[in-house]
Amino acid sequence: MTATTQEQIKGILAGYCDPALGVEILPATALKQMTLEAGVLSLELCLGFPAQHYQDLLRQQLQQRFSAIPGVNQVDVKITWEVVSHAVQRGLKGLSQVKNIIAVAAGKGGVGKSTTAVNLALAIAAEGAKVGLLDADIYGPNQPHMLGVAQRRPESLDGQRLQPVECHGIQTMSIGYLVTEKAPMVWRGPMASGALQQLFQDTLWQDLDYLIVDMPPGTGDIQLTLAQKVPVSGAVIVTTPQDIALLDVKKAINMFNKVAIPTLGVVENMAAFHCEACGHVTEVFGEGGAQALAEEFHIGLLGRVPLHRAIREACDKGLPTMLSAPESEIGQRYKEIARRVLATLSLRARDYSSKFPNIVIK
Ligand SMILES: Nc1ncnc2c1ncn2[C@@H]1O[C@H](COP(=O)(O)OP(=O)(O)OP(=O)(O)O)[C@@H](O)[C@H]1O
Ligand SMILES: [Mg+2]
């Protein structure tokens, strides 16, 4: 292969910004192999995130671009991936059995954090990653219900640590598995934070690429515990386009900024109402809010999810959209959001702390 051709290939890769993602993914991509023989260009790319479904789209896009290089008649792009750990807050050590923790948060209640978190976890798993979902809502856990496994109980083999409840291809843990749905949960602040830490530490997560944490509303004790004690690689902020939500959400972003947890982007939930009867689309909470927010904080808009009855019904039935209708338009939205989250995280610095032993000076 001539030096010019090599330069052209590398130039295409370096400047490539996936139109569907709006994220430059190639800085985190390794070029494993590249040959040009008899007009056949073969490339092997190793992405920093799983791409079971996304790879076809990416391959098509790249093949189109490479075909334009003089002397290239055929293009074979092989795509593989490897998930690595990304940097966490300074002073905290990453976990050996969990590569990346992603918190799904909002300053406000009821904006769709849990709905987004569960669909995000399932969408990431569908791309070929090992995924866990931790319900950090100690006061009102609803992941067991949303996943249709409220009657399941986690097992403990050693009487101390809990096996996560495995369902729909993901590992899950929630305080909801440990208390009955009818018993009201009365926790004082420190107890609640302690319970979260325990759920997090005492669960035997098995080799997770990503652990998605569904955060409770607000910016109180639990949020602080997460920010200060749990090694988080990135946060996904959920908001409705409503102004108040945006004010609260700024608080949430600022809190993550303060402890140096990068915000991976914002999901605008309940973005527009789709009337099933007449097909009319109404911007119930106004429009453009999340876009403005993303610009103000220099973070990406991860996607917009409409206000749609099917989304609520799916969660109420215990079969979130990513299980009941993954190929629907809404399912596609969740898949795109998942890809943007993963691609954005893959560009963050790596973390090697879990590979080093603890050093104790006596
Ligand atoms: N895009 C949507 N369209 C329709 N209903 C939705 C949508 N997103 C969430 N919902 C519904 O809105 C309600 C609140 O959603 P969810 O429980 O996910 O919010 P939350 O932010 O986690 O709330 P909390 O602060 O109480 O934890 C649920 O009944 C859910 O099914
Ligand atoms: Mg919730």
Image (cartoon, rainbow, N blue to C red):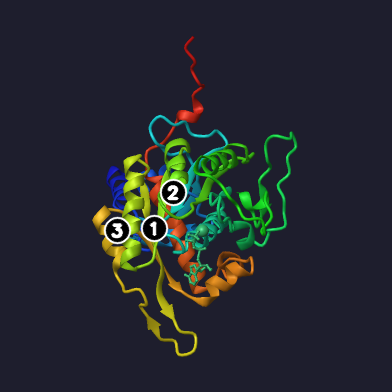
- The amino acid at mark 3 is Ala
Q: Which label's residue is closer to the chain start, 2 or 1?
A: 2
Q: Amino acid at mark 2?
A: Leu
Is the C-beta separation of discs 3 and 2 under 8 Å?
no
Could you tell me if residue 127 is visible in this image? Answer: yes
Residue 324 spot, x, y in % from top left: 61, 69
Rendered image: mark on residue 74: none
Which residue occupies the foreground of this view, 341 or 49?
A: 341
Residue to which mark 1 is pinned: 62
The N terminus appears in which quarter of the rendering?
top left
Relative to residue 350, is residue 204 drawn left or right? right
In whole angstroms, how far apart are the C-alphas of marks 2 and 1? 10 Å
* Residue under the point 66% across and 58% down: 181
Residue 347, compared with residue 71, is above or below; it is: above
- Looking at the picture, tell me which residue is in the foreground, 291 or 42: 291
Q: Nearer the viewer, mark 3 or mark 2?
A: 3
Disc 2: which residue: 43
* Residue 251 position in % (x across, y down): 33, 52
| Secondary element at tag 1 | helix
